[in-house]
Image: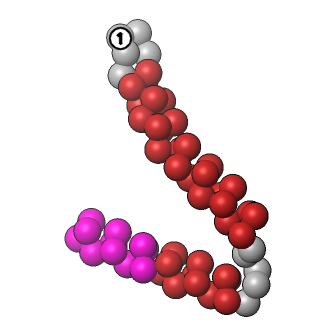
Amino acid sequence: MIATKALYNTSLHVIKLATYIYFGTITQDPLSSHLAMGAAAIPGNWLGYSISQLDGW
């Protein structure tokens, strides 16, 4: 069930992104900065989780 929902959400967002690019709503400059922020969120979430697992939190 979780994999099905993940596949659905991924497909939905890829289609939305393609539509936004097609109609010119998203250009190269904002797209690259958003992808960089998304990539930075992964280690940020890992770091936050790791800190929250320390004793005393």
- Asked which quadrant contains residue 27, the reply is bottom right
The residue nearer to you, when weighing 57 against 44, is 44
User: Element type at marker 1?
Assistant: loop
Residue at 42% of width from left, 80% of height from top? 11
- Asked which quadrant contains residue 22, the reply is bottom right
Q: Which residue is mark 1?
A: 55
**42 versus 51 height, above or below:** below
Q: Say which quadrant the N terminus sits in.
A: bottom left
Percent x, y for residue 16? 58, 82
> Which residue is situated farthest in the top direction here?
56
Q: How is the image coloured?
A: secondary structure
Residue at 37% of width from left, 15% of height from top? 54
**42 versus 23 height, above or below:** above
Q: Report the magenta residues as a range.
A: 1-11
**19 versus 3 height, above or below:** below
Residue 8 in magenta stretch: yes
Residue at 44% of width from left, 21% of height from top? 51
Q: Answer left or right for 4 relative to 51.
A: left
